[in-house]
Image (spheres, rainbow, N blue to C red):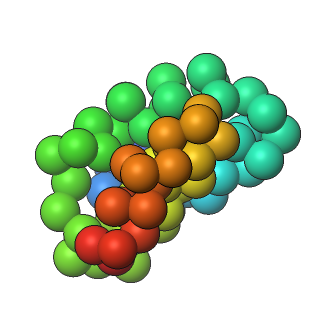
Amino acid sequence: LALAQTLHSPYWIRSASGWLASVLVRQGDNGAARALLQHIDVTALPMDTIAARVVWTAQAELELAEGHPAAGLEILRQL
């Protein structure tokens, strides 16, 4: 993620952030995952690139992990 930020590459920043957020959710660190996804401002991100879809998938995983299945499933339905 640090390298992606150094490169100022939206694609790599989003990809790395999405994958990292997914790992954080799987490790049970939902707070860190949420903070990372808020930094990306996932709600303003269209689902039109692979990197954006990785971020949205991580958001769906976070919603499911936090006990919000309807929100998680709605995101997945839109993907």
Total number of numbered discs in the rendering? 0
Q: Residue at x 78, y 47 (%)?
A: 26
Q: Residue at x 41, y 51 (%)?
A: 70
Q: Nearer the viewer, residue 28 or 49?
A: 28
Q: Position of residue 32 (x, y in %)?
A: 62, 25
Rendering coords of residue 44 (x, y %): 16, 46
Horizontal side of residue 43 vs 73, given as left or right: left
Apparent side of residue 51 relative to residue 23 in the rendered image (left or right): left
| Residue 52 visible in this rendered orientation of the protein | yes
Whether residue 3 appears in this view of the structure is: no
| Side of 46 relative to 3 (left or right) | left
User: Is residue 37 shown above or below 57?
Assistant: above
**Residue 77 at what x, y percent from top left?**
34, 74
In front here: 71 or 48? Answer: 71
Where residue 11 appears, as percent x and y from the top left, is 36, 65
* Residue occupying image coordinates x 51% and y 49%: 69
Say if 72 sits above or below 6 in the image: below
> With respect to residue 49, does 58 lie above or below?
above
Question: What is the residue that sits farthest to the right in this orientation?
Answer: 27
Q: For the point 34% across and 39% down, which residue is it?
A: 40
Q: Quadrant of residue 6?
A: top left
Nearest to the observer: residue 37 or residue 76:
76
Question: Which quadrant, please, contains the C terminus?
Answer: bottom left
User: In the figure, 73 relative to 63: above or below?
Assistant: below
